[in-house]
Amino acid sequence: MVAFCVRFSTDCSESIRIHVTADERYELFVDGERIGRGPDRGDRSNWFYDSYDLEPEPGDHVIVARTWWLGELAPYAQISVRPGFLLAAEGEWHDRLSTGAAPWECKEISGYRFTVPDLTDRTGPSLAIDASKFPWGFETGSGGGWREASIAGAAGSPVNIVEWHGDRTLKPSLLPAMVDQSRKAGSARFVSAPASPDTSLIPIAAAECLQEDINSWNCLLQGESGLTVRGDSIRRVIVDLEQYYCAYPEIVLSGGKGSSVRVLWAESLFETAAGANGRPTGHGNRDVIEGKYFRGKGDVFEADGGTHRRFETLWWQSGRYLEVLVSTSREPLTIDSFSLRETRYPLERESAFDCSDGRLVDIVPIMLRGLQMCCHETYMDCPYLEQLMYVGDTRLQILSTYATTRDDRLARKALRIVDQSRLPSGLTQSRYPSRILSIIPPFCLWWIAMVHDYAMWRPDRAFVAELLPGVRSVIDVFRGWLNTDHLLEAVPHWNFTDWTSDWWPDGDPPDAKGGISGVLNWQFVLVLGLAAELEQYAGEPEYAQIDLNLAERIRQALDAAFWDEQRGMYADDLARRRFSEHSQCLALLSGQVEDSMRDRLAYGLENDPGITRATIAFAHYVFEAYDLLGRTDLLIKRLGPWFEWRALGLRTTPEGAPTSLSDCHGWGSHPLYHYMAGILGIRPAEFGFSEVRIVPRLGPLTWARGSMPHPKGCVTVNFRIEQRRLAATVDLPDGLEGTLVLADGTHRLVPGLQHIEEAQ
């Protein structure tokens, strides 16, 4: 942990543009005030830098950067090369401020200890700060211990920053600044005086609550006043944030030399302290804390007796509940303030949806919050346990993003950086950025689907063309896994598809490990069709035909090997003993199923009691199949698990069943997309969303309305069933035309407001 400092003076008001990066992370202060954190997570081929515009008044000033490098303790998503800090200033300020040119100083920041939390080692270490060893005031450049910084190389010309010491390719950040807002820290629901700071095996019991302390803690949490904890005592406080947050805790302490404040975070409390594997189990209703156990991860702040010591963490924590444990020594400890600084990608909802079934509307806040909490410098599967951008998760999150906002910067970063994760074999990695290698071949195919999604929903043919070599590379690898019967066989690595309730070991479909899987083959057929459309869009019909020919050969082989005539469905295995929604949905979505089989597949998908059912994430593909079949009634019926979440006290979308480990998984937000593209039926009719095709599918609903962001504005619709006929109001932004498909035929749409009714 090192701070770097440069001092400068100005005779008049100035405007200074600087570019900053570090390995691994930095916080940047100007005259003691933090102005930014970074850099955005990437890899050595995409090492991002941030740009800042400074406006110093006449006088003396100081720029300080706190930097750190955690090595093997770093989060899995944090790639690094070697420690360092770089600042490049433009124009006449280059020699006065740039590293390698200006007289930069440095000093070690002591007082930090790092430990690996027992719940997960993937998000980075827990932190303890010893105030007696910490160099307070370092951010202002004050205090002793500053010395001349070692120069590994000059910052170079800020006009054309390309490489950093030849180790990394530097690129400007693709993203806006993360949200950085102070939040009230919920309310205290329980305060006790345990005999020991080891509280993980002590259940919450109302009879032990110190009710007289609740009000004082709530005044602290609401920023109304501080509080003092007497010497030689322990206080345990359970704080309900009442919403799921990703945030940096900030706590200010005075006095209490030798005291400590431990702040642990949890998504929810547990019904048992430890299961068979030693880990806590069961959640039940998340709003209920009585009789439950708190197991969390977080940080410790150790007081030195000084006044107004402001403690902050290096990385954010996440969850709904906090356990604040105050352990004092002989002196009383005063907590002057306690607050949170929320952080996330600034994804805000620009869409709207309402309908006659209030259950669909009621779950929108849960899905939106789940999506937001999994959007940071990358998309991520979950903020609490991994913070990794898995491709299978990310595809669903990006589709939800397209249906929610016009902002596609995070989506573009995801597409590009996964493309550049490709290995010499040609496969993309399953999650990226990541310092730990992981390959999931089905996710390589879903990345191709992500490229196709972008090509449909956003007008940027050149960007799509940049990604096509990667698309072809992935397909070539899969082509090499085809056997002489034109079926994928013995696909290596982890072939995760879904965490089904049936026995799919490690989420692999039947026979995926070393055999021939119907599920994997149908996924390949589906994606070959998407790749062919991308090739046509790019003006490469020959490549498109190659993909289509291959898809047809595999489809014929699938018909021969996996079609079960008696059952009227495709099997998952060659023995035709295992059947799933996954095979049927992928076959339907591929567009390769013969008409004679389609109705039988649809019937089995709805009625066969013996098939493996998809869970939360793969339900996206089930919903897409329902849309293809015009079965909104089945979609709404299938939303049953989503409808239960509010009653269970969830604030975000869980990974799977309410008993699953993670309470926040962004992939469960995909109904945000299906409301728009399925029920309201708003979809691109052409690549680049140059035209819109609207096919409302109300099913059992009597009315539905909403608006969806489009690159040219918003598409707004209002549908109502009147005397068994659908009445439609559609408002298109300037420059957008399209079609509205109703039972009586197709109606042409033009920019502006228009009213259309089905003919009798």
Image (cartoon, helix red, strand yellow):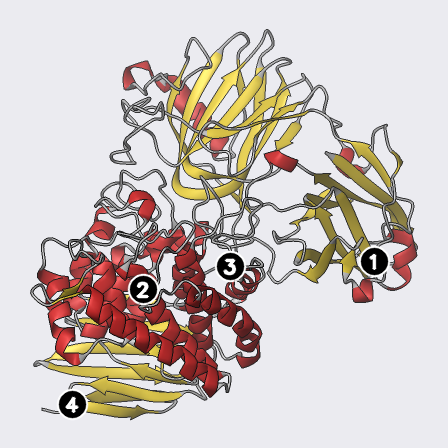
Mark toward the start of the polypeptide (3 vs 1): 1
Q: Residue at x 77, y 37 (%)?
A: 3
* Residue 744 image position (x, y, % from top left): 15, 90
Left or right placement of residue 615 versus residue 43 in this view = left
* Residue 440 image position (x, y, % from top left): 43, 53
Give me the disc on residue 576: none
Mark toward the start of the polypeptide (2 vs 1): 1
Q: Residue furthest front?
A: 484
Mark toward the start of the polypeptide (3 vs 4): 3
For the residues labelled 3 and 1, the Cα–Cα distance comes to: 36 Å
Give me the disc on residue 744: 4
Give me the disc on residue 428: 3
Count residues near mark 2 (Cα–Cα under 10 Å), then give few for <14, some for 14-19, many for 20+: many
Query: Which secondary structure lies at badge 2?
Result: helix
In the displayed structure, 242 sits above or below 460; it is above
For the residues labelled 3 and 4, the Cα–Cα distance comes to: 46 Å
Q: Which residue is mark 2?
A: 521
Q: Which residue is mark 1?
A: 89
Q: Nearer the viewer, residue 526 or 386?
A: 526
Q: Quadrant of residue 585?
A: bottom left
